[in-house]
Structures are given as C-alpha cells and as structure tokens.
Image (spheres, rainbow, N blue to C red):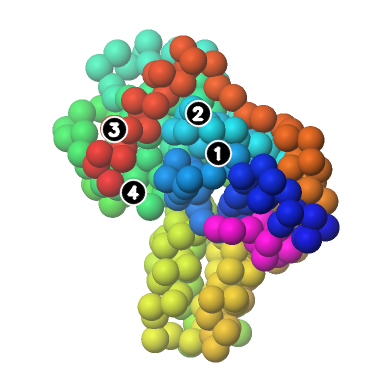
Amino acid sequence: MEEQIQELKVRRGAIVIAHNYQVDEVQAIADFTGDSLELSRKAAQLREEVVVFCGVHFMAETAAILSPDKTILIPDPNAGCPMADMVTADKLRALKAQHPGAKVVCYVNSSAEVKAESDICCTSSNAVKVCESLGDVEIIFVPDRNLGAFVAEKLGREFILYNGFCPTHERIRDIDVLAMKAQYPGALVLAHPECNKPVRDLADELLSTGQMCHFATASENREFIIATELGINYRLRTENPGKRFYPVNPDRAVCPNMKKITVEKILWSLQDMKQRVTVPANIAARAVGCIERMLEIS
C-alpha cells in the first residue's frame, strides 16, 4: 500500500499531511506532521495541488479556506470533532445577541460557519496573544471552556465561555497525573490547555501539540509525562530516541475520530480522489478574514 501511495502521489501531484494525533503508521508515511493550523498553513505554501489531509473535518475545512484553488481530500469524511460540533453558527449568533459589544474569539477547532461568525480565530499556541491583542473588551470565547479559562487566567480577565470541551482531554484526570508523578518523580508534566483546571494546575508546561514536540527536543530533561491525546507520543519518541515519554491514561486519552484514518483509506483517497472538502464561497469569504486576522498577530 505504501508503494502504491507513493506512486499515486507522483501521478496526482499530491502530498500527504498528518496531525500529531494520527495513528503511528499514518504519521510514518506522511510527508509532514504538525498541529491543525500548522498543517493548513503548510498546505497553502506547498507547490502540490492535491493535499491529503489526515486529520478531522474542521482541519481540512481550514486548509480548504486558506487554499481555495487546491484539492483538499480527507480520507474519511466521518472523522469529525465532538468539540467543534458543540457550537453552531445559530448558537453563536444567539450568544452574540446577548452581548452585542463583545468580540468573538473562535478556537480553530470549529466549523467554517462558526469561524464566519467570529471576529478572530486562535490556536492553543497563540490564544493568549490573540486575546491580549483585542484590548479591554468583552470577549466571547468559543467553543472550548478549558482553553478559554486558561487564557482568561493568564490575562487576569473574565471571559464569556461557551460550554464546549474536548471529550478526550476531559478523560485525562488529575489523580492519574499525580500517580504518574509519584512513579516518575524526575519527569516534567507537559499538558495541553484543553485539559481541565485540576490537570492544568499540575502541569510544568501547558503547550499545544507542536509546542510539546519542540519543547521536548530542546529540553535537557530526559523524562516527560504527556497529558494529551495518545497519538503525539509516536512523534515524541521518533524525534527524541534518547528520551522517555509516559502518556497519561493511554487507554482512555484516545480520540476515536483521529483514529478513523488508516493507510488503506489514504490509498483509496488517492485512487478515487475522494473525499474532497469544500467550503461555500460566501462562508469561506467571511471565515478567511477571521483566520487572517489571527495570522497577522501571530
């Protein structure tokens, strides 16, 4: 299958990119791995006209918005995001009506329609900087209550937090982190800010997936407790063979949607040129402004 994928990539003028949470074998054959926005920006910069996006649907949508002239394929169109599904454009419009003077900061983990209703987008790595750039204004933060609370704490502010969350990160518990700290007392705890507050409070560093990878490589520490989705441990181990990584709740901190994409589905995607992800022009035109305003800041 890998040989066929390589042949089809050449024939189609395609490239395969994969999120850090993908299964090991998908990350192994990808041309580039990274976090969601990093992948979308990479897709826009590459010369290839066909991009096989191994991630969840909102990520492929973002790539389609930033690269409207390219063919963005997702190997499994059912790879969704429960947190992104928790907020809709209608729900956001209703919340905006209750707070007419507020600015809407939209986490990139959201649909194109929600981005179109937002003032500015953010990622887990730049959320603090984005919110800080808005000055002393009321902020509606959607959809992740945990990331929003983390940013509000950092800035000493109060936000209007939408009650969304990542089910996978919610399954990471503080008692498990404490048990691992007792077992590996020399290990640093790296946690994603999508984790709940008790877990965030135990972390030595709160980082996006991309930041975790860079931090682990640059750090002189040799052991790390990783509080995020299990898939990232493949990249951490591969890039840092002399270091040890201990995932928290490895049986439960698994995103079933991220695991829907397989090497076989990548092959089928290239064979049939499916499933193409597109965004209606009227929505894309509004959503791209939300994303570009973030890129100007970060």
Mark 1 vs 4, N-terminal side: 1
Q: Which residues are magenta?
A: 20-32
* Residue 276, image x, y percentages: 67, 30
| Amino acid at pointer 1 | Glu
Residue 5 included in the magenta stretch of the image:
no
* Residue 130, image x, y percentages: 28, 41
- Marks 1 and 4, how far apart in space? 28 Å
Q: Quadrant of residue 115?
A: top left
Disc sitting over residue 49 in the figure:
1
Mark 3 vs 2, N-terminal side: 2
Q: Quadrant of residue 75?
A: top right
Residue farthest toward the left in the current orientation of the protein: 136
Front position among marks 4 and 2: 2
* Residue 245, image x, y percentages: 58, 78
Mark 3 vs 1, N-terminal side: 1
Q: Are marks 2 and 1 in contact (CB under 8 Å)?
A: yes
Front position among marks 3 and 1: 1
Residue farthest toward the front in the current orientation of the protein: 11
Q: Are marks 1 and 4 in contact (CB under 8 Å)?
A: no
* Residue placed under numbered mark 3 in the picture: 293
Disc sitting over residue 126 in the figure:
4
Q: Are marks 4 and 3 in contact (CB under 8 Å)?
A: no
- Marks 2 and 1, how far apart in space? 8 Å
Give SS at disc 1.
loop
Is 102 left, or right, of 210 in this rendering?
left
Residue 182 appears in the picture as rendered: no
| Amino acid at pointer 3 | Arg
* Residue placed under numbered mark 2 in the picture: 69
Q: Are marks 3 and 1 in contact (CB under 8 Å)?
A: no
